[in-house]
Amino acid sequence: QVQLVESGGGLVQPGGSLRLSCAASGIIFRNYAMAWYRQPPGNKRELVAVIASGGTTKYAESVKGRFTISKDNAKNTAYLQMNSLKPEDTAVYYCNAVGHTNGNYGNYWGQGTQVTVSS
């Protein structure tokens, strides 16, 4: 059974920082690209950042220079370090894993974690 469990969300003031974690189980983690998406209130889900299985990263323009995605294959965990947070970063953040386990393609989602940026 595949599980992605996010943690680290919460309430933070503008300019503050948070680090989200996504702990994966049931997959061969090193074979997967990991991504973070977010869904602001009343809006569609959007890609925030992605890290390929080989370590290449890509970011949405709105978070470049402020957010950093990383993954630790030994811990089966992906991270999103968020600095200089803005009210417009308020959203539910979702972890996504895309890759293969023993030749079987998989695309999995976590349950989401709320991030609220407000004074």
Image: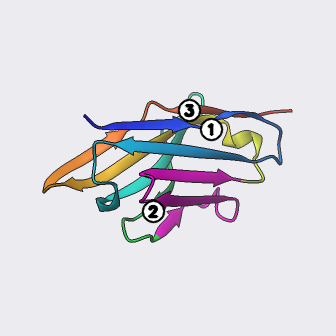
Kindly indicate whether the residue at mark 1 contacts the one at mark 3 (C-beta within 8 angstroms). Answer: yes
Q: Is residue 44 visible?
A: no
Quarter placement of the C terminus? top right
Q: Quadrant of residue 91?
A: top right
Badge 3 marks a residue whose secondary structure is strand
Q: Residue furthest left?
A: 103
Residue 48 within the segment the image draws in magenta: no
Q: Amino acid at mark 1?
A: Gly
State the separation of the CA atoms marked 2 and 1. 19 Å
Which residue lies at the image location 29% right of the left edge and 37% below the top edge?
A: 2
Give how far across and how far down residue 51 sits, in percent. Answer: 45, 62
Residue 65 within the segment the image draws in magenta: yes
Which residue is under mark 2?
51
Which residue lies at the image location 49% right of the left edge and 48% below the top edge?
A: 36
State the separation of the CA atoms marked 3 and 2. 19 Å
Give how far across and how far down residue 94 sits, in percent. Answer: 48, 39
Badge 1 marks a residue whose secondary structure is loop
Which residue is under mark 1?
8
Q: Amino acid at mark 2?
A: Ile
Rendered image: mark on residue 113: 3
Badge 2 marks a residue whose secondary structure is strand
The mark nearer the N terminus, 3 or 2, is: 2
Q: Is residue 64 visible?
A: yes
Q: Is residue 41 left or right of residue 49?
A: right
Q: Nearer the viewer, residue 61 or 4?
A: 4
